[in-house]
Image (tube, grey):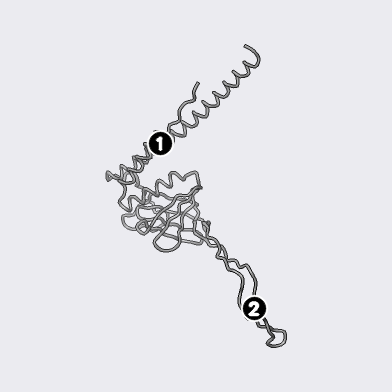
Amino acid sequence: MGFFENRRRKAAERAHAQAVAKHDTAVAQWQQESEAINRMLEVVRDCLSGRTHEQFNDPSDYGFMLKKGEFAIAHLENVAYIETVRAPSTYSGGYGGVSFPIFGRVRLNTGAMRGRATRGEESISMTDRGHALVTNTRIMFAGAKRAKEWRFDKMLSSSHLPGGITVFAMNTGKPSGLGYGEGPASEVQFRLELASSIALGTLDRYEAELVAEQSHHQSERPTPPTT
């Protein structure tokens, strides 16, 4: 075997080894996600079968006032309170009036403004940090500056955003929500969706969504590299 042929062979072997390692990592990640979906389906089906108490039997209220029949589904520590904030308005242009003296050096301006006032843009910002409790009827937040309740039966929508953020749109007031980070995002979002489904009586619909997600995930199992 010649020198250049030997180099090509070794390069191909390295490329194949890298492809195998990449595939193994992808399979491990896929398997972890598959197990998570299976576990979520098990919890939802237990709730559908009337075994909710077997999944959620923590008697603690974590410092929140719970109503009769209300139980904790998730307790979130050190989460951010997210709300819609509008930047200050700005003004550009000039004054187009005239001025004339009143007394001494005091002058009075009259006329019209020729500039333009622009409302500040709205953005989602963190305005507090504290603890939250997700129950079978609502979500509660208690921070250093704010206390907030989101009832599922008053909620118009909830949106999961990149970075581990969920924003709730209610029938009154501006959208607001919680920030919990990328790490626990999958688990937190599952518990939020589960709590909402329990509160609204839509567990069967949520089960169907998870089954569809499970089927799609099965079809995306990583294929091994060619030899």
Residue toward you, 6 or 139: 6
Outermost residue on the right side: it is 105
The relative height of residue 25 versus residue 3 in the rendered view (above or below) is below
Q: Indicate the position of residue 85 as horizontal and vertical percent values.
A: 52, 61
- List the residue tagged with mark 1: 217
Which residue is pictured at 43% across the width and 47% down the height?
188
Q: Is residue 92 left or right of residue 204?
A: right
Q: Indicate the position of residue 170 as horizontal and vertical percent values.
A: 40, 59
Q: Indicate the position of residue 78 as horizontal and vertical percent values.
A: 50, 52
Q: Indicate the position of residue 203 as horizontal and vertical percent values.
A: 31, 47
Residue toward you, 102 or 126: 102
Viewer-side label of 1, 2: 2
- List the residue tagged with mark 2: 97
Helix or strand or loop: what does disc 2 sit on?
Answer: loop
**Three-letter residue code for mark 1:** His
The relative height of residue 51 versus residue 94 in the rendered view (above or below) is above
Query: How far, Cα to Cα, is label 1 from label 2?
Result: 68 Å
- Label 1 packing within 10 angstroms: few (<14), some (14-19), many (20+): some
**Three-letter residue code for mark 2:** Gly
- Label 2 packing within 10 angstroms: few (<14), some (14-19), many (20+): few
The relative height of residue 178 versus residue 119 in the rendered view (above or below) is above
Quadrant of image for the N terminus: top right
Pointer 1 or 2: first along the chain: 2
